Image: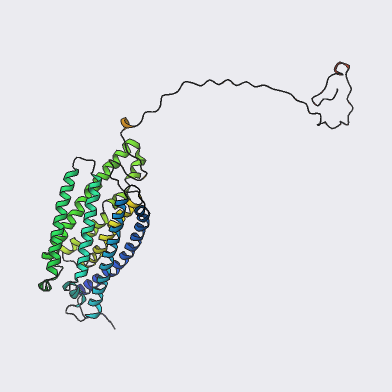
């Protein structure tokens, strides 16, 4: 006897994608909690002190708190809409998958857009920090501002459209509503991620040439490139958009994951900055060990050798005798010689 519902395989697969995506989203929220706590632990002492860049540390502290709140709202309402689709409205035509695709949650959509804006803004800022000492710095700032403005416009339009009653006829996941907005966001992610990776690889080559091959790997390791470029965010965006365009149901799972990945990727970058391992604003400097990189011609010259120091050492030997120390008597008698009768041994005895 089979308890399988009388539904098509494609529909059951789509419902499974929605449910599994909600479960993994909850797991990612646990990662968000841990990363947010680690960032707070690292940033709080610096934000309380009046040391250098304490204002930046306070801003990052507020940024982490805002991301944590947005991530919490997202996972809470995502769980709610999953419950509504699979339990409260299980008899909806074509099942829970059709219900979730047709139902829009304003708090969920707002949290998704806000987290996306925060992630894009941090990605642009990190890229401008990496290129601060280059000639194309102002071009990077202008291009990043233009793309971010496009993301704000498309995201705002998407929120307004899906909040109207007319959206129920086409669904909030329709290509005409969601695709342009996500394309802008993905363009920012991929473009600035590639620029950051190129800059890090160039810096790695430069460090290796000046300090040796071992130092290059230390300053621009694989983990540093992945974190600084927010590659996790870009990869997850591609994993959602490609199946979404091809109309594959697995995109439903990655759509839910994307909301939390947009929070995880910035928190990883902020934690790296808080631990003093991120790329600083200083020219051609990575803050792994606070060692500035300089050309060989800029390095300080070794001091000239001083005049040789001649030291003359003399040794003076002195023999002393101690009358309190006597040698034990020998069981064999010794003949005294007249020639040495008036001489004394090392212990002061006549021999």
User: Relative to 178, is 12 above or below?
Assistant: below
Out of 106 and 61, give the one closest to the viewer: 61
Q: Position of residue 289 (x, y in %)?
A: 37, 44
Q: Quadrant of residue 112?
A: bottom left
Q: Which residue is rendered at x = 28% and y = 65% of the image?
A: 69
Is 307 positioned to the left or the right of 294 in the image?
right
Q: Which residue is rendered at x = 33% and y = 42% of the image?
A: 216
- Position of the N terminus, as image quadrant, is bottom left
Q: Position of residue 197 (x, y in %)?
A: 25, 47
Is 199 positioned to the left or the right of 332 in the image?
left
- Count of picture labels: 0
Q: Position of residue 133 (x, y in %)?
A: 24, 41
Q: How is the image coloured?
A: rainbow
Q: Quadrant of residue 172?
A: bottom left
Residue furthest front as drawn:
50
Q: Position of residue 349 (x, y in %)?
A: 84, 25
- Position of the C terminus, as image quadrant, is top right
User: Relative to 137, is 184 above or below?
Assistant: below
Residue furthest top as drawn:
339
User: Relative to 205, is 306 above or below?
Assistant: above
């Amino acid at each position: 006897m089979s308890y399988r519902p009388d539904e098509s395989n494609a529909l059951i697969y789509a419902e499974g994608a929605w449910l599994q995506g909600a479960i993994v989203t909850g797991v990612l929220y646990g990662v968000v909690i841990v990363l947010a706590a680690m960032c707070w632990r690292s940033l709080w002492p610096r934000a309380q002190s009046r040391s250098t860049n304490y204002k930046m540390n306070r801003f990052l502290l507020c940024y982490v708190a805002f991301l944590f709140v947005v991530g919490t709202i997202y996972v809470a309402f995502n769980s709610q809409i999953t419950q509504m689709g699979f339990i409260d409205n299980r008899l909806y035509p074509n099942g829970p998958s059709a219900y979730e695709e047709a139902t829009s949650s304003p708090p969920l959509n707002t949290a998704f857009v806000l987290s996306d804006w925060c992630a894009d803004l941090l990605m642009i800022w990190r890229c401008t920090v990496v290129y601060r000492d280059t000639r194309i710095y102002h071009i990077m700032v202008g291009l990043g501002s233009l793309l971010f403005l496009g993301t704000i416009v498309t995201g705002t339009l998407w929120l307004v459209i899906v909040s109207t009653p007319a959206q129920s006829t086409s669904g909030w996941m329709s290509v005409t509503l969601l695709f342009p907005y996500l394309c802008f966001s993905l363009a920012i992610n991929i473009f600035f991620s590639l620029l950051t990776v190129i800059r890090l690889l160039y810096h790695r080559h430069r460090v290796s040439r000046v300090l040796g091959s071992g130092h290059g790997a230390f300053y621009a390791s694989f983990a540093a490139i992945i974190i600084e470029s927010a590659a996790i965010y870009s990869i997850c965006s591609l994993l959602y958009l490609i199946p979404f365009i091809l109309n594959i149901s697995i995109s439903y799972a990655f759509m839910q994951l994307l909301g939390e990945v947009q929070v995880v990727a910035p928190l990883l970058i902020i934690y790296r900055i808080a631990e003093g391992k991120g790329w600083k604003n200083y020219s051609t400097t990575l803050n792994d060990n606070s060692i500035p990189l300089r050309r060989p011609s800029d390095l300080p010259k070794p001091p000239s050798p001083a005049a040789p120091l001649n030291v003359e050492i003399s040794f003076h030997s002195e023999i002393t005798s101690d009358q309190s120390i006597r040698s034990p008597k020998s069981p064999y008698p010794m003949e005294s010689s007249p020639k040495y009768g008036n001489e004394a041994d090392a212990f002061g005895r006549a021999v």
